[in-house]
Amino acid sequence: MRQEGSITAYLCLMLTLMLSLIFGSLESVRNAHARVLTSCAMDQGLYSLFAKYDPVLLEQYEVFFVSGGSDDGSWQPERLCREIRETALKVLSPAPADGILSGSPANGKITEDYVTGFCLATDQEGWAFSRQVCEAMKESLGTYGIQQLSQKLMKEEAVVEIQEQQKQKYEDGEVIEEYEEVKEPTGEAADSTGEDFVNPIEVIRQIMQMGILSLVLPSGKGIPDGTAEVSQLASRRELQSGFGIPIPQEQESIVDKLLFVEYLMWKFPCYTKQMGHPGLDCQVEYALIGRDSDKENLTGVVTQLLVLREAANLVHLVSDQTKRTQMESMSAVIAASLGIPAATGVIMAALAVCWAFAESVLDLRELLDGGRVALIKDASSWQLALEHLPELLEKGDEYRKDISGGVDYQGYLRILLLKKSMNELNFGAMDLVEYNMRTIYGKEKFRLDCCVDELAAGMQVEFGRRNYQITRSYGYRMETE
């Protein structure tokens, strides 16, 4: 009898242990199930949020961003939490389960949700925007395309820099002032050169006083009149800032700069590639100059181009023996006409500056007319003969040349853009994206500082008497090994 009681007690103990083990396993399964559901709910909420990127930004500008702003342009991070929450609840509240999992962690409740950090398109001088642009350009061009682009642009930039250095010997203003000083005692008194002689320096000096656009725009080309309220663009206003997401401190790469220059030329119009929409048409010029009208931006660009072309043309004039001989002869004639034969050297320097200026005017007219000019001038690509200097305004277009293999207007814009810092290029592009999104694509309150590149969020979920907490981050950053 005692033995039977011992057996019964043993069996009861074993049964108790087995039931404890079974219920413990079930509880462990329930906990694991809860954790998996919580993790899946958080991931699904973030995936759903970032799947709602702005399709216009992607289609038109190759960048992924999800908007965290409202229709009136205000920053509303609660919208992001609401999107994550709504999607997560669909995962946490599946159809009721049958069998041993009935009553297990289904119908979980979100008791708290919050954002722990986010990175906006404009944070740290537009780091996220710049990164996405460079990734898109690398994908578009490929390694070979990047190499070809780099070689071409770097070669052209080097040539221009050398020309500018060599031109420093001829400070235009100082050369003309020195000419004025030596001429002043005698004025314009003619000598034995004859009544029909025209001093080309005096003609070109008068032309130099004209408005630059009226001088360089080719016949039939109007002055653009687009305007924009630039004070409300990204580079001019106070921007919303993200927090809690570490942003790498990276050195500016020359390759990234080249890619960004090409992006600007690809995505935005310029004077010779207008899009015909209301508002700014000289948008690449805006990235260079940053003024609120096409006229001001184009004026700023052609002024810079005039300096570049004067340098190139002066380099040719001082190295070409034939033209040097012509200038020496003409300078002697001008000196005789002014009665100051000892000033031939000063007059020759002024004549070189005037000739280079006149040739540069024709260069710019050709560029703005869609043609090409030689980066390095030679006798065959030179346009304006010395004796035709006084005819620059009347007959100058007759001497213009479109040089096969030369550099066009867009090519020169690339050279000017390379002189800007990466920060300036980035903000120029962000301004233009905002402007076009508002004026062309109907998003009147669009702001890049309401566009999210990466988000870190968390939530607390309740299953029965247990709470589970989780944080996750997600974004458009492309990880490279």
Image (cartoon, rainbow, N blue to C red):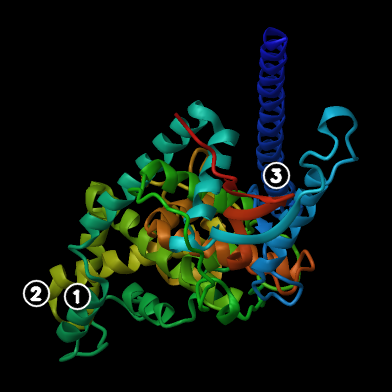
Q: Earlier in the sequence, mark 3 or mark 2?
A: 3
Discs 1/3, front:
3
Query: Label 2's element?
Result: helix
Q: With respect to residue 383, does 1 lie above or below?
A: above
The residue at which mark 2 appears reads as 342
Q: Residues within 10 Å of mark 2 (few under 14, many from 20)?
A: few
Is 432 on the left-hand or right-hand side of 166?
right
Q: Which mark is residue 335?
A: 1
Q: Are marks 2 and 1 in contact (CB under 8 Å)?
A: yes
Residue 235 picture location, percent across and down: 50, 72
Residue 381 seen in this snapshot:
no
Is 204 on the left-hand or right-hand side of 74?
left
Q: Residues within 10 Å of mark 1 (few under 14, many from 20)?
A: many
Residue 145 picture location, percent across and down: 51, 31
Please state which of residues 260 and 69 is positioned toward the viewer in this rendering.
69
Is 383 on the left-hand or right-hand side of 222?
left
Q: Earlier in the sequence, mark 1 or mark 3?
A: 3
User: Which residue type does callout 2 highlight?
Assistant: Ala
Q: CA distance from mark 2 to mark 1?
A: 8 Å
User: Which residue type does callout 3 highlight?
Assistant: Tyr
Q: Are marks 1 and 3 in contact (CB under 8 Å)?
A: no
Q: Quadrant of the N terminus?
A: top right
Residue sitting at x 33%, y 51%: 160
User: Which residue type does callout 1 highlight?
Assistant: Ala
The residue at which mark 3 appears reads as 47
Residue sitting at x 86%, y 42%: 94
Query: Label 3's element?
Result: helix
Discs 3/2, front:
3
